[in-house]
Amino acid sequence: MREGGTTHPYLMLPLLTDGYYNPDDGLYTTRSGLKRYYYATDNVCNENLRGFTPEDLTDIFVEHGLHFHAATQTGVVFHLISALSEFGKLGVTCISDSQTNSLRLYESIIRVLEMEGNEQERARQMFSS
């Protein structure tokens, strides 16, 4: 499942999981034989994320346990984060053991980003008053 116009997610998958795409069955398989699925977009936008740094983003997702885990070969990888601070925009690739779980991981990311963005906006308003 892919949303967006970049090949970043597809190119990241073999680097992260050391696997391969099998055109015969249409599945992606890791070297250890595990099936992996991804949901990706390069268009996560939230104005309240303006001012977040890549380090902030990493801290947030490690805290929530959503970062990519090399041992399980599942989790979230970010890309296009150079637009985060200025525009509140980034890309994400969610890698999991099923299509359903990849989408759930993406939905979790969106909820966390909305929560963190809203907290940052409340802090801005408090300090500007």
Image (cartoon, rainbow, N blue to C red):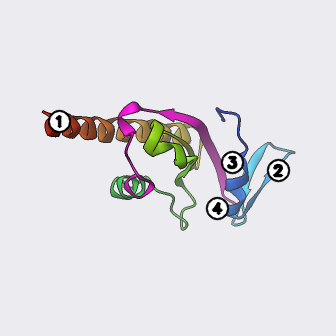
Q: Secondary structure at mark 4?
A: helix
Q: Secondary structure at mark 2?
A: strand
In the image: residue 52, left or right of residue 29: left
Q: Are marks 1 and 3 in contact (CB under 8 Å)?
A: no
Mark sitting on residue 128:
1
Classify the position of the C terminus by image quarter: top left
Judge whether 40 appears above or below 53 on screen: above
Question: Around disc 3, counting alpha carbons within 10 Å, would you say few (fewer than 14), some (14 to 19), or many (20 or more)?
Answer: some
Q: Earlier in the sequence, mark 2 or mark 1?
A: 2
Whether residue 26 appears in magenta in the rendering, the answer is: no
Residue at position x 58%, y 46% from top?
80
Question: Around disc 4, counting alpha carbons within 10 Å, would you say few (fewer than 14), some (14 to 19), or many (20 or more)?
Answer: some
Q: Please provide the residue range marked out in magenta.
A: 33-56
CA gap between label 2 and label 4 equals 17 Å
In the image: residue 19, left or right of residue 22: left
Residue at position x 35%, y 34% from top?
48
Which residue position is annotated with label 2?
22
Residue situated in front as seen by the camera: 125 or 31: 125
Residue situated in front as seen by the camera: 73 or 59: 59
Residue 94 image offset from top left, x and y in percent: 55, 46
Residue at position x 64%, y 61% from top?
16
Classify the position of the N terminus by image quarter: top right
Q: Are marks 2 and 1 in contact (CB under 8 Å)?
A: no
